[in-house]
């Protein structure tokens, strides 16, 4: 009897074990409706907007591709309308305006005032962070941010609206969507650090005035109306940047924004930043400003969630390396450009929304919204000036066929071959889906893609 009992017990255990194995309870389900709640809760995204290079000329109705460095009032008005349409869907937590409000004409003050006024009328309850571009000065292109040497009485673009209830450089600072915390703003040079709270997470935004770092060319050079030389201003801003970034904890989340990116100019093949500017780091070691900037990024890589730039009017990427042997080293940052509303470089007018991981602000994807001309001439070059938004857009992940919803833009580019990045970008994204790629405006993306330490 005892042996029969043991046999029945063993048979029961075997059948129980076999049934459990058949069910395979730990295998993930393909049905999103029955995915465990804790899996869903670990990854959520939100959005913010970027806008740049409007170059408004309110005396013009519309501007044709490549004619002048301006945007006509119709295209700008339609851009405002399109932003309001997009806002209803993406519900942005904030916007960053990446510089260059007015055109290059004599009506600088009026056009700056017009763009700022229109930005304040945008629908939605979100703060708009502004940082200066090379046109955003009182005395002309590539001048110092402030127009004279009086630190307390100098005029800059923020002086055009002295009755504002929320102080510059942020519009709608009292937003209930995103809490705008402490801000350290250098009024004379236009750079600042601001802390934003989105949900229960904090984001530190460092906005630089990279016009201070610009390379002099035959067409322009930095002019110090404020009485501070480019060299002195560069050292002051760099030291502040290094100090602020170093002071943040490794667990902090930082987004860096500027107008002129580092690296090479894809049009003129020159440098974006001045090679003759040498700045000392915290160890009193002097390097070219770009080299020291790359080293600071490398030392603080775990904190930096993204680097946002503009200036080229195109929709591009730049891989940043802190060494000249970049194929043997890790990428320390990725510069993502926002296209211009101005169509000077034969790009379509456009702006962007970014999606980010709400737990750490990693950039997950971007969407570029753009307007198109309504007609083209017989020579196959677009001549029509009437640009209209028609609910068209493209995304980074769809362009590169990235299926993983959690993969960051940084990780995706870091894992791609050089030629794969360029092929996809030059075919669709670079000119913001414009077909008017004239030879004189051809952008050398091979040259501009990689930003490296220069010996």
Image (cartoon, rainbow, N blue to C red):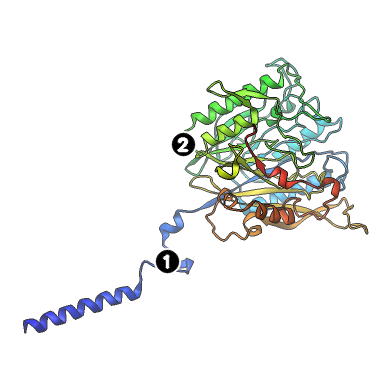
Secondary structure, mark 1, is loop
Secondary structure, mark 2, is loop
> On screen, 72 above or below 164?
below
Q: Is residue 53 left or right of residue 253?
A: right
Q: For residue 105, say whether it is visible.
A: yes
Q: Is residue 429 left or right of residue 372?
A: left
Q: Is residue 11 left or right of residue 39?
A: left
Q: Residue at x 92, y 57 (%)?
A: 377
Judging by the rendered image, the residue that carries numbered circle 2 is 250
Q: For residue 187, say whether it is visible.
A: no
Picture quarter with the C terminus:
top right
Q: Residue at x 47, y 67 (%)?
A: 33
Q: Residue at x 57, y 32 (%)?
A: 295
Would you call the spot at circle 2 few (<14 residues within 10 Å), some (14-19), or many (20 or more)? some
Tell me how many marks there are: 2
Picture quarter with the N terminus:
bottom left
Choose between 381 and 82: the one closer to the eye: 381
Which residue is at the far right? 378
Judging by the rendered image, the residue that carries numbered circle 1 is 28
């Amino acid at each position: 009897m005892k042996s029969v009992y043991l046999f029945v017990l063993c048979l029961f255990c075997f059948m129980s074990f076999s049934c459990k194995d058949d069910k395979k309870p730990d295998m993930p389900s393909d049905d999103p409706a029955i995915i465990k709640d804790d899996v869903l809760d670990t990854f959520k995204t939100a959005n913010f907007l970027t806008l740049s290079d409007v170059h408004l000329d309110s005396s013009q109705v519309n501007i044709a591709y490549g004619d002048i460095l301006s945007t006509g009032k119709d295209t700008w008005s339609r851009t405002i309308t399109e932003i309001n349409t997009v806002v209803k869907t993406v519900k942005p937590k904030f916007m960053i305006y990446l510089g260059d409000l007015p055109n290059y004409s004599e009506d600088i003050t009026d056009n700056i005032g017009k763009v700022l006024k229109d930005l304040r009328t945008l629908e939605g309850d979100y703060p708009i962070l502004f940082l200066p571009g090379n046109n955003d000065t009182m005395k002309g292109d590539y001048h110092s941010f402030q127009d004279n040497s009086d630190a307390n009485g100098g005029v800059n673009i923020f002086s055009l609206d002295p009755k504002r209830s929320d102080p510059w450089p942020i519009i709608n600072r009292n937003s209930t969507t995103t809490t705008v915390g402490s801000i350290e703003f250098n009024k004379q040079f236009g750079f600042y650090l601001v802390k934003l709270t989105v949900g229960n997470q904090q984001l530190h935004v460092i906005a630089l005035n990279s016009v201070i770092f610009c390379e002099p060319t035959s067409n322009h050079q930095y002019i110090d109306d404020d009485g501070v030389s480019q060299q002195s201003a560069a050292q002051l801003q760099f030291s502040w940047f290094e100090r602020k970034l170093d002071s943040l904890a490794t667990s902090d989340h930082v987004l860096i924004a500027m107008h002129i990116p580092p690296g090479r100019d894809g049009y003129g093949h020159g440098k974006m930043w001045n090679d003759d500017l040498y700045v000392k780091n915290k160890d009193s070691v002097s390097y070219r400003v770009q080299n020291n900037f790359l080293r600071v990024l490398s030392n603080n890589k775990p904190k930096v969630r993204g680097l946002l730039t503009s200036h080229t009017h195109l929709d591009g990427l730049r891989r940043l390396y802190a060494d000249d042997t970049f194929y043997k080293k890790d990428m320390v940052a990725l510069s993502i450009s926002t296209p211009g509303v101005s169509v000077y470089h034969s790009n379509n007018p456009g702006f962007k929304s970014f999606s980010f991981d709400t737990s750490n602000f990693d950039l997950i994807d971007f969407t570029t919204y753009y307007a198109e001309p309504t007609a083209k001439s017989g020579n196959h070059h677009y001549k029509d000036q009437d640009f209209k938004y028609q609910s068209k857009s493209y995304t980074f992940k769809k362009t590169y066929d990235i299926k993983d919803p959690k993969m960051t833009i940084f990780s995706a580019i870091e894992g791609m071959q050089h030629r794969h990045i360029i092929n996809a970008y030059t075919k669709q994204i670079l000119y913001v889906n414009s077909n008017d790629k004239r030879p004189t405006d051809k952008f050398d993306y091979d040259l501009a893609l990689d930003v490296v330490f220069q010996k």
